[in-house]
Amino acid sequence: MTVKNGAASTNKSYDFLVFIGRFQPFHKGHRRVLNKALAQAERVIVLVGSSHQPRTIRNPWTFVEREQYIRASFDTATQERLIILPLLDELYSDQSWIKRVQDTVHGVVSQYPTKVGSSTPKIALIGHSKDHTSYYLSLFPQWDSISVATYKDISATGLREQYFLQGNIGEEFPGPVRSLLQNFRQQTEYATISEEWKFIRQYKQGWEVTPYPPVFITVDAVIIQSGHILLVERKTSPGKGLWALPGGFVNQHETLQTALLRELHEETHLKVPDPVLLSSLVCSQVFDHPQRSERGRTITHAHLIELKPDAQGLPKVKGGDDAAKAFWLPLAE
């Protein structure tokens, strides 16, 4: 028996289909995948990637906003079959990310009775096999994998660029999403992202005639003392107003440690002698994910420095250079 208006039926091939995506923003290509999933499964688990991150030109919308866009594209009965949850990124550990997905799916599946599978729920992944970002479809051998062809070669990157640089809202979006995007265009967040997009575009034009895209080397200082971490608030784009670790680009004549100390003093005016900082250096680690910076390929060397507790309290700091302010934040926060 099949119930109309999107309600769950008893003639599906799967108990659950899992659709993982960033949905930045949700467009007709995404809706097409969900429609195919709904036709084959009792329920669809939608995992919204890159959740709980600050807004950037690559991820301009929050999880709550993206969930709203997805639900607005379906009727009420169909929405009841959609289980939409946030999914955090794990850029440097596929295994941690896989476990996060497995745990999330298991937590959902355990709440519902099995209808299709005889003893255990029958689960599959569904998505586009379009580029390197779709490799996750092969990371879950315990589940079936369903690949859906791209819809009219829609690119969310191009849609974001048109939206934030030109204000265009094309026919690639479901009607309710177009209305929500029109409303978002009136908010201050839209102006902030649009300004950052223009900055990034102009920034990249400075080296677009080079034979190869440049690779930038940066340093970051992870300063810990008495359960606090030293942070700065960015003064300019990209990431204006966001919190960050003190750090910056390595100059041509500098070693990594020289650049680290320079950036640390320029941005925080930390009143700790260099010999003390260097003797408190615990370790350093490279972070080189290709998408970690919107400005281009940026490889950073993070240095962990643990300062000993001081009876006089935390060292005085003051923002400078690219930092609007510097401050100590309790690790619990």
Image: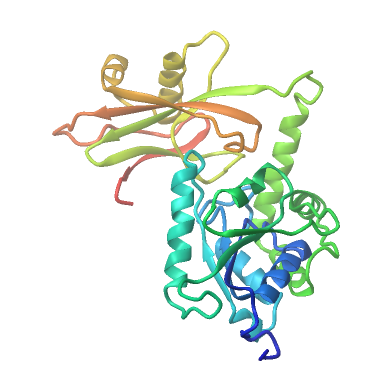
Residue at the outermost front position: 118
* Residue 188 visible in image: no
Residue at the outermost left position: 311
Nearer-the-camera pick, 189 or 23: 23
Q: How is the image coloured?
A: rainbow
Query: Is 14 placed left or right of 324 in the picture?
Result: right
Q: Where residue 272 sits in the image (x, y, percent)?
A: 29, 23
At 46% from the left and 16% from the top, the residue drawn is: 256
On screen, residue 211 above or below 85? above
On screen, residue 310 above or below 167? above
Q: Where residue 310 sits in the image (x, y, percent)?
A: 17, 31
Query: Is 13 placed left or right of 102 in the picture?
Result: right
At 64% from the left and 86% from the top, the residue drawn is: 7
Q: Where residue 238 sits in the image (x, y, percent)?
A: 61, 39
Nearer-the-camera pick, 30 or 144: 144
The count of marks equals 0
Nearer-the-camera pick, 5 or 315: 5
Q: Where residue 15 sits in the image (x, y, percent)?
A: 56, 74
* Residue 67 visible in image: yes
Quadrant in the rendering for residue 14: bottom right
Nearer-the-camera pick, 220 or 89: 89
